[in-house]
Amino acid sequence: MAGRRTDVLDVRELVRRVRLGDGVRRIARDMGVSRKTVGKYVKWASEKGLLSGVLAEPGEFKRRLDESLPTAPPPRGLFKMARYGEQIQALRAKGVEARAIWERLRETPGFEGSYSAVWRFVRSLEPAVPEGFVRVETSPGDEAQVDFGYAGLMYDPDSRTTRRAWALVMTLSYSRHQYVEFVFDQEVGTWLRCHRGAFEWFGGVPKRVVLDNLKAAIIRHALHDPVVQRAYREFAEHYGFLISPCRPRTPRHKGKVEKGGVHYVKRNFLAGRAFSDVHEANDKVLVWCMQTAGLREHGTTKQQPLRRFDEAERAALLGLPASAYEMAQWKKAKLHADCHVVFEGSFYSAPHRLIGKSLWVRAGASVTIFLEHDVVAAHPRATRRGQRFTNNDHYPPSKVAGLMASPAWCHKRASEIGPATSELICRLLDDRPLDRLRTAQGVLRLAGKFSPRRLEAACRRALAFDEISYGAVKRILDRKLDLNATPPSDAQSLPHQPAQPPLFVRPWTDFFGNA
């Protein structure tokens, strides 16, 4: 995170940790930032009054950060040193230091690399010196470690097929008591559901959860920028625990679940056993957690995990919230030209001004759409693929009129303009509604071009001459005939009568003489 402003969600998480009493050193280590950075944001949050009261929403954090801490430009990309690899290796073999290598490479035509780029390249060529480690023991209720492990093939009764299965194992670091569940995927929804099951199994929540950089929980596998999925952060905030991702490629940092959890489940429970389906495996593994794994003498603590849990750790766990977390998924989706995003094969509308932008979709019992941290749309969740949920206010105004122009809408709109317009539209639609609906829509659209007052006058003149068509009304407006005197009111006030044959006073034979 060095050299740029910390992400809004990271700043909010940092403030949340401070409010929960986490120390600066712990926050810096877990979030992969320097203590100086933590101090800077703690001071900023204190000045803005964010360390007390209700924790502000992400949108409020972003607005305050934009006002006081503008985003710094991203750092330039590092120069690739591969083309100079052989030259660097030859110089290094002679004992030349990185600084001297950089000075010599600067004499090479076309070389523009920095000293830091050369230093990193040299370091990558030489193996690191092995370092010693310290076994860390935690206080009761302070920590749980969680991981997935391959569990072989199991029968899935829902799909009626044999599928690859994984064991999710959560181990409490103090007591080594554990929860195990077999699943068929490592999706975010499965990850959260298993966490919820583990917390309910333990009857409480640990203060922090240590996890590997698996994709379900961590988007980017990077030490200094472990961007946690929005769903997992929301889940952690609901249950009140802190997320502590491991450094990439360091499974030793969660050894309690890596060795004593996943490997132990594979060797002791799964080895030599067969199950009719995954449900039987899940029922039996929980019995095994209590009667076998929970009652064994642990190799490190030299105590039974279940006894250690009952005596010290159960009471130290955080209480479960009043309501279970509503399972939700987060996904980024582009707003297409039809003003809809696509989520799980269904369509949800959002304001047309955001067309082409990437929006966040949160899908729980309902679907909420965010632009960064601000809500822009909300819909019920689809029950099947292909459903479409549309708010007409999300369309451009010019498109809404044509979309809503049903016969009922045409009658309502015409009555708002005036009695003559209403009569003309009624005569159009009462004749052949389906065939003349588009004609009625066209007449009403003239109000936008010429004004409702002029359209009312034009319709009055068209009725007077019994010219009931879009073309007649349009010609009257184009030639400004509606501004002339209207024909006598009795002609337009008469109800419409079907055409009658002409009547003559004298028969036509009177006009011809006898031959």
Image: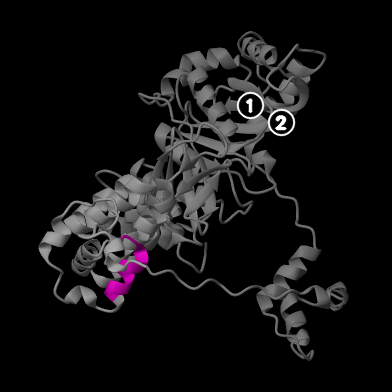
Q: Say which quarter of the image contains residue 212.
A: top right
Write down the residue under mark 1.
Answer: 169
Residue 139, compared with residue 429, is above or below; it is above
Quadrant of the snapshot with the C terminus: bottom left
Task: Residue 32 in the image: state x and y as whole percent.
Answer: 53, 54
Is residue 58 at all visible to an observer of this figure?
no
Q: Residue sitting at 56 percent across and 72 percent down?
A: 75
Task: Residue 169 in the image: state x and y as whole percent.
Answer: 63, 26
Residue 380, compared with residue 37, is above or below; it is above
Residues at marks 2 and 1 touching, judged by CB atoms closer than 8 Å? yes
Image: magenta residue range:
467-477
Q: CA distance from mark 2 to mark 1?
A: 8 Å
Task: Residue 489 in the image: state x and y as whole percent.
Answer: 11, 63
Q: Say which quarter of the image contains residue 171.
A: top right
Is residue 327 at all visible to an observer of this figure?
yes
Q: Is residue 398 on the magenta stretch?
A: no
Kind of element beneath mark 1: strand
Q: Residue furthest left?
A: 489
Instruction: Give whichever of 285, 20 is nearer the camera.
Output: 285
Q: Is residue 9 left or right of residue 303?
A: left
Amino acid type, mark 1: Val
Write down the residue under mark 2.
Answer: 149
